Image (cartoon, rainbow, N blue to C red):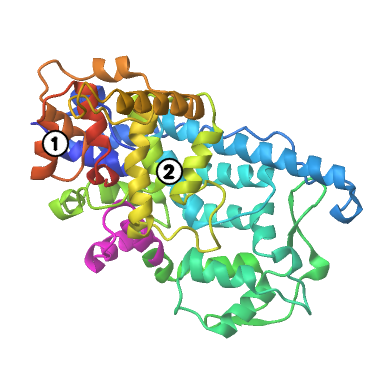
Amino acid sequence: MNNSKNIKHLYARAGFGIRFEDLHDHQNWSIRKSVKKLFQASEKIEPLKAVTENIDLRPKPAAELTEDQKRALNQERNQQEKALNDAWVKQLSTTGAQLREKMTLFWHNHFSCNVGNFYYQQELNNIERANALGNFKTLLMQVSQTPAMLQFLNNQQNQKNHPNENFARELMELFTLGRGHYTEQDVKESARSFTGWAYNGKDGTYKFNNGTHDTGVKTFLGQTANFCGEDIMNIITSNKQTAVFICTKLYKYFVNEVPDDIHIGQMADVFYKENYEITPLLKFVFLSDWFYDEKNIGNLVKSPVEFLVGLNRQFYINYQNPDVLMQFQRTLGQVLFRPPNVAGWPGGRSWIDSSSLMYRMKIPSTILNAGVIDFTGKATPEDEAYLASQRKQQLNVIKRVQATPDWDKFLKDIPKDTTHEDIARFMLEPDLNKTVIDEVNRPGDIKSVIIEIVSTPEYQLC
């Protein structure tokens, strides 16, 4: 049985796409076997180790630093940010643990956090990676006790007599229950329960400050006791609405931007019954018939990171200048470790507007062919000025981008008798329309055809 369409869909969603050679090897596998192999490949946890020093652990507060020291500190931070960003993009682009990294990307946005300390950012990212396919309750607790999150949501300032509600509010609104499932009074009482949650500024470890904790009686979601933060977490996760909220986000991430209440209800039943274990929930989704429904194939817009990583994986691209990848992320609106706010990137159709679409469609030719979609046959031989300008543009792009795709490796994976149309069918998730078919059937060498394919609007979908 040839399952290639469904396996291609599975890898587009549970990973960052599949290569020719892998699809050729897997096309006769059952979906059950493919899903099993995906999870097996993601058992290994590879933490990022790009940032080795916590540069915020300085004896002097910023106010006491000289201008030169401040400048040196900023420079060091910028270098750490680049190193961390580059390390994660490399890992996303080369890892065999595609599903683990895809879920780490999901949690990276779910627990949106933007602090200037990249040692703390790396620690948070590694916690999300370690628990990406584990237990949500464990993940929630560990994330909430990181210096990055305690700092970002101001829980360091949350003390009895002066409660700070920021963390308590976002915990319910964005991480667990969703808006409308708690009251303002619940926020106040929850904030009191989280007083005393802090981290040690010297070594960045979590600590509970007994002296700043409010030991009074609190009433939260209809229950009354002398609650601490752990109690609040338990009450929140024992409420099935948390399972529904997480499953709705996962459905939109893996299946369809338009929620299907029946399917989300089934997912929430599994998640809640399994005590918030993530792996059984994802297996349920990937083994459901509805996951492979026609309406759920090729209908999601790739995030900028998914788009860039997909290209890197498909064409084995090597960047000599990692700054270029950060520049691409900036222009497309998704810089890793720099979400726009506490709610993260909105995702979906918001990734694409007319200017970002034009830019996205230009990127593949920039990386794969030094900025030129091959115009062979489109310019007359007399048009020397035009061709010269093209060559000059190519040289400029090569100097600036410094990206090297491995065309030999990519082309070697394509079976000899594959038609241009077959290649397009493999590389694009949506069904081919007449425009694409006409485009790829024009005379031209295989490299030009492939660059045309990945420069289409359809390539933006997964």
Q: Which dot marks residue 305?
A: 2
The x and y percentages for residue 273 are 36, 60
Residue in the foreground of this view, choosing between 309 and 291: 309
Q: Name the residue located 69 percent from the left edge and 65 percent from the top edge.
A: 154
Q: Is residue 237 left or right of residue 384?
A: right
Give coordinates of residue 123: x percent, y percent. 63, 43
Quote the CA–CA distance across marks 1 and 2.
Answer: 27 Å
Mark 1 vs mark 2, foreground winner is 1
Residue at figure coordinates x 13%, y 35% from the top left: 3
Residue 259 within the magenta-colored segment of the rendering: yes
Mark 1–mark 2 CB contact (< 8 Å):
no
The disc, 1 or 2, on the residue closer to the chain's N-terminal end is 2
Name above or below for residue 383 compared with residue 79.
above
Q: Kindly identify which residue carries mark 1.
A: 439
The N terminus sits in image quarter: top left
Give the side of residue 53 with respect to residue 399, left or right: right
SS at mark 1 in the image: helix
Residue 298, image x, y percentages: 21, 48
Look at the image and say whether residue 321 sits in the magenta stretch: no
**Residue 441 in the figure: left or right of residue 53:** left
The amino acid marked with disc number 2 is Val
Q: As shown in the figure, which amino acid type bears the numbered disc 1?
A: Glu
| Residue placed most toward the observer, 94 or 434 | 434
Q: Which residues are magenta?
A: 245-272
In this view, the residue in front, 321 or 48, is 321
Q: Is residue 133 visible?
A: no
Q: Residue at x 30, y 59 (%)?
A: 267
Against 398, residue 247 (above or below) is below
